[in-house]
Amino acid sequence: MEQLTAQVAFSPKVRWLLNNAGSEGLEKQLKVIDALKELSKYKNISSFIHDFAVYFQGSDMILTPDMKTDASLYFSRFAIYTARRGEWVRHQLLTGLHPKQYLPSEPVRRENVQSNMITFVQSLPYEYVSDIKGQLIVQIDEQQLRAMLTQIEGVNDGSLLILNEKREVLMSTVHGDTAAAIHRHLRQNGGINEMRIDGEPMVLSRVKGTNGWEYVSVIPKKVVLQEVLIIKRWALILLTGCLAAGIGGSYAMAYRYYQPIKSVVKVLAQRERSSAEMYRDEFDLIKQSVVRTLEQEDKLRHTLSEQAPVLRANFLSRLIRGHVDLSHGMSETLDFMDIRLDNDYFGVILIDIADCSQFIQGDTEREWGLVRFVLTNLGHELLQGRGYIVELERDRLAVLLNVPESSASVSAIRDDLLVPLKETAQVRFKLSIACGVSSIHRGIDRIAAAYSEALMALDYRIVHGTESTMVYDRLTRANLRIITIRLRRRFS
C-alpha cells in the first residue's frame, strides 16, 4: 500500500491534473491519457488490492487504471457501496483530510458481484494538510486477507480481528454478540488478557502493525497452554524421580561405605574450604559438589550444542575452499562435526544471489540473512541427503555434493537440484540466482579443485548473463580464453 500511494501521489501527471483541474483543452486530454496509462501499470501491484481510483476534486473527475468518469457515475455504476448513501461517499471518501485512513469493511457491488472491501483513503497532494485537491481511494479485498489468516485461525482454533488507528473493526472472523463482547473487552483492558466466550476461557493477544493496524487474536486457553502443561507434568515427574533416586542411593552408599566417603569428603573440604561452612554435613557437601559438577557439564554441553551449527558451517566452508588439513584425523573430525560423507565422489555448486530487490525491503544484513535462509532451506529439501549447503559470503552459497558414482551426470544434478531451486526462488520469492557447477571428482582431497572449477564456471556468467547456470564440463579452452580476455577488458 505504501508503494502504490507513493507512486500515485508523486506521479508528475497526477500532480499536474490536481493543480490544473479547471483548465480544459488538448493538453489536459493528453495528460489524462498519460495518467491512465501510468495508473494501468500499478493495477496488479498486489493481489490484496482489488481496485483503486484517483478523484480530482476541482473537476469532479475519477481516474482508474481502466477508465475516466465522474464521481457520481463511478459510485453509482462501477463501485456501489450498497450499505451507504451518496452523502456518506462524498463525506468519507471524496472530501476532507484523510491521511492514510483505513475504513471498516463495507459491501461493494461491481458488475453484479458484491464483496466486502476495506477502503483506504489518502488525500492528495500527499504532503498537504489543507487545500485538498483530490483523494486516492483503494479497495482492499477482505477475502484475500481472510485467506491469508485462515491458517493462523485454523491452527490455533481461534479467531482474529483487525482494528484501524481509530480502533474501528476493519475485519473480523467473528460476528454478532461475540465480536461486540471482544471489542468491548479490548477498550477496557490492554496487553494480553483473558476472557470467557460461551463459557470457555480465551486468551486475547494484541500486536501493532507498522501501518497502524492492530491485530487481535482470540485463542482458547487450553490450546495456548497445552504443550506447557505437558512439559510441566513431565518435568515434575522427572524431578521427583531424580530426587528420590538420589536420596535413596546416597543414603544406602553412605551407610555401607562411610569410610571411603569420609575420605572423599575430606578431599572435597580441602578444595572448597572457603565455602565449607555452608554445608550441614558430609552428605550435603558431596551432594552439592556433584550437583555443581553436573550443572557445569550441562552448561558445557549446552554451549557446545549451540555452537555446533556454526562450527559445522565454518568447517564445511574451509573444506570447500581447501583450507583443511586432510592428512590425518579426518574421520574423527567428520564424526565430531556430525558430517556424513559416505560416498567417494564430490562436486561443488556455487550459487550467487544476482538480484533480490523484489524480496527484501532494504539493503541490511537482516534482509540478506533472510534471503540466504530461504535458499539454504530450499537447498536442503532438494539435496535429500546428497550433500550440504553452506554460506560463503553475503551473496554466495556453496553446495557440496557427495554422490556414489562418477557417472552421476551434471545434467541429472541440474534437473534434480538446480532447475527446481531456480524456479522456486524466482516464482515464489522473486530471487534471481546464478550457478556455477564443477565436474565430479573422486576423493575428498579433490573438493578444492571442484571449488576452483565452480568459480571458473561462475565467472562465465559475464558471457551468458547473471541468471545463467554455467557447467564447467561445457567450457572449452576457447571459452576460458574468451572469459579471460573479457575480464581483462572489463577491468583494464
Image: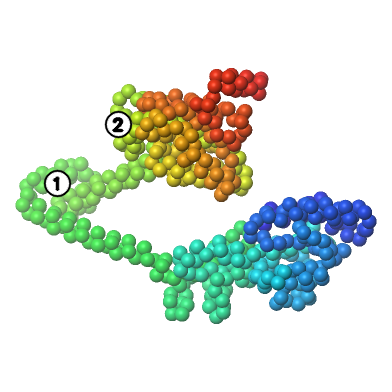
Residue 307 shows in this picture: no
Amino acid bearing label 1: Val
Q: Quadrant of residue 125?
A: bottom right
Residue 440 badge: none
Q: Residue at x 72, y 69 (%)?
A: 111
Mark 1 lies on residue: 265
Q: Residue at x 62, y 33 (%)?
A: 465
Seen from the viewer's position, the closer of residues 193 and 31 is: 31
Secondary structure state at the residue bearing disc 2: helix
Disc on the earlier residue, 1 or 2: 1
Vertical relation: 398 (above or below) 226: above
Q: Residue furthest right?
A: 25
Local crowd at mark 2 within 10 Å, few (<14), some, or many (≥20)?
few
Disc nearest the viewer among 1 and 2: 2
* Quadrant location of the N terminus in the rendered image: bottom right
Counting from the top left corner in percent of width and height, residue 306 is at 38, 44
Mark 2 lies on residue: 331
Marks 1 and 2 sit apart, C-alpha to C-alpha, by 42 Å
Q: Quadrant of residue 482?
A: top right
The reply to whether discs 1 and 2 touch (Cβ–Cβ < 8 Å) is no
Amino acid bearing label 2: Ser
Q: Residue at x 80, y 55 (%)?
A: 36
* Quadrant location of the C terminus in the rendered image: top right
Seen from the viewer's position, the closer of residues 41 and 313 is: 41
Counting from the top left corner in percent of width and height, residue 165 is at 64, 66
Q: Residue at x 51, y 42 (%)?
A: 421
Counting from the top left corner in percent of width and height, residue 291 is at 23, 50
Q: Quadrant of residue 24?
A: bottom right
Vertical relation: 203 (above or below) 327: below
**Left or right of 378, for residue 296:** left
Secondary structure state at the residue bearing disc 1: helix
Counting from the top left corner in percent of width and height, residue 130 is at 81, 62
